[in-house]
Image: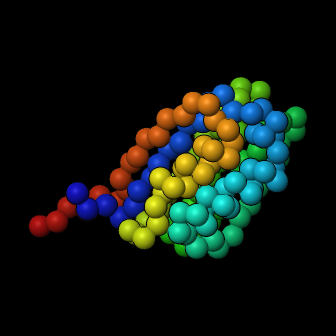
Amino acid sequence: MNALGRHILVELYDCERSALNDLDLIREVTVKAAIDCGAEVLGESFHRFSPQGVSGVVVIAESHISIHTWPEHGYAAADVFTCGIAVKPEIAARVIIEGLGAKNHTLTEIPRGVLVTV
């Protein structure tokens, strides 16, 4: 199967609740995930909600990494979408899982831009 990109959906459960509300930590972990997987960081934007929760995105030349947190549930959802073969999205997912101390997680990979060859 030929696909233009790989999209990994990361479900993080039983995370440290204070970590999920720490905008600086979320930014640090997400940017580190981009760098460690071999991506080229182009920009980032993060927002802390009141009374709790953080959402953010790191734009990479190869696509994006995004995260949304629900501290009250110890839960976060992250997307790691990369194009090409040089970047390893599974490395980014691992950095996020470890960085937020998730005790449980699931990964779902979706090939994006599946091309039919004739």
Nearest the eye: 101 or 46:
101
**In this view, 20 is above or below 66:** above
Residue 79 showing in the rendered view: no
Task: Find the residue positioned furthest to the right.
Answer: 51
At 62% from the left and 31% from the top, the residue drawn is 103
In the figure, is residue 42 to the left or right of 71? left
Residue 4, picture quadrant: bottom left
**In this view, 23 is above or below 41:** above
Residue 92, picture quadrant: bottom right
In the rendered picture of this protein, how many numbered marks are placed on residues? 0
Residue 83 image offset from top left, x and y in percent = 43, 66
Residue 101 showing in the rendered view: yes
Residue 59 image offset from top left, x and y in percent = 62, 65
Task: Find the residue positioned furthest to the left.
Answer: 118
Colouring convention used in this rendered image of the protein: rainbow
**In this view, 43 is above or below 111:** below
Q: Quadrant of the N terminus?
A: bottom left
In the figure, is residue 73 to the left or right of 2? right
Residue 17 image offset from top left, x and y in percent = 77, 32
Residue 31 image offset from top left, x and y in percent = 68, 61
At 78% from the left and 51% from the top, the residue drawn is 25
Q: Quadrant of the C terminus?
A: bottom left
In the figure, is residue 64 to the left or right of 76? left
At 63% from the left and 44% from the top, the residue drawn is 98
At 61% from the left and 58% from the top, the residue drawn is 33
